[in-house]
Amino acid sequence: MKKADALDARWSIPGTSEIAQMLDEKITRIARSKFDVLIQGEPGSGKRFFASLIHLRSTRRTGDNFVEVTSQTPDGELRVILFEEDRERQEGMLGKSVPRLDDRSTLFINHIEEFSRFDQTRLARFLIQNNVVAGRRHSKSRVIISTWTSWSKLVEKKRVVDSLDQNVREFELFVVPPLRDHWEDIPALVELFLMQIPGNGIHYKLAVDSNALRTLQKRAWSDNVRELRMVVEEAVMNSDNGVVADLSKVLDDVEKVGEIIRTIQSGGRFSIEQSLEFLEKRFIHRALMRCSFDLGKTARMLGLTEQNLRYRLRKYNLRNGHFTSKN
């Protein structure tokens, strides 16, 4: 797959395993239907990706109005999205335009279990009104809800309000498998992630032997596709002229982050200075990726001068041959 195909790849499910093919067929069927959808999957398994893919493939939703709300969505913004309440004033206070829901829109409610009971009740009211609109005038906005666990468990543990449960029971269920269940697709996922990383003209390629690839495929991947993507992005930062080879070191670094977190959670002792240096390097990695390797933008994001950022790049032996500065 070429770099130019990265945009088209957003319509595709990477990989050729039986699971990838099954997911592809189910996404196509759901996209052509009128059903609202409940997406269930472990953390990092790609629930948002599949929600956006349903939206993109939907024959009756050709627009880009994919609207995501989370438990962190500001109250005023949520009220505007759901009920068009006081739009003009709220947009002025928020300093941005708030997307509108119509018959070409998809509302993605990400991780419903994190919403307060009050907000869940409001979401249930929206679902009722959305169905009423569909029955009276035109096609409703499609609604997709994601959860980390099964809906029945959420209901059993009283993690969702009754009014919401009554509406969601009719949703089409789509279960996202963990990465360990379709490890054969890891090479295709790695290739896709490499294409999606901005590189200022550099086309990244993976250079690993079969043993290294087997190491990737046998890994537990507790954070699923999200963890794999992080490993690829970290490896790119240490690449040499676009050749990404040292994935084993990156895997060790990911394990170290997990070890730091587990040590804190268990109340164990650790070196805060060494840990902070290790994490600072990771933060700089992330900021550089976010800013397409532009040092000026990265420095502003991190609250540093560009000179100070360059010092830290040398300190942590980060390769900077393909970085830019547009100041």
Image (tube, grey):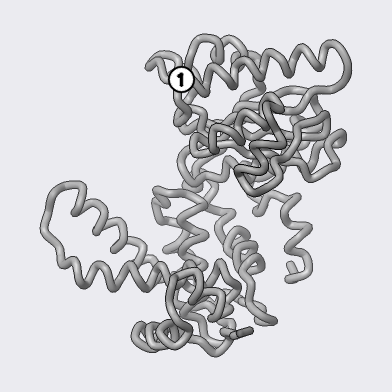
User: Relative to 183, is 20 on the left or the right?
Assistant: right
* Position of 270 relative to 47 (above/below): below
Residue 311 position within the rendered picture, expressed as x and y whole percent measured from the top left? 39, 88
Residue at coordinates 50% horizontally, 47% vertically from top-left? 179
Residue identifier under label 1: 117
Residue at coordinates 51% horizontally, 68% vertically from top-left? 233
Q: Say if residue 24 shows up in the picture.
A: no
* Position of 296 relative to 267 (above/below): below
User: Relative to 221, is 107 on the left or the right?
Assistant: right
What amino acid is at disc 1? Arg
* Position of 309 relative to 192 (above/below): below
User: Relative to 35, is 192 on the left or the right?
Assistant: left
Of 128 and 40, nearer the camera is 128
Residue at coordinates 29% horizontally, 63% vertically from top-left? 256
Residue at coordinates 63% horizontally, 84% vertically from top-left? 326
Of the 4 image quadrants, the one containing the C terminus is: bottom right
Residue 10 position within the rendered picture, expressed as x and y whole percent measured from the top left? 72, 53
Of the 4 image quadrants, the one containing the N terminus is: bottom right
* Position of 304 relative to 193 (above/below): below
Helix, strand or loop at label 1? It is helix
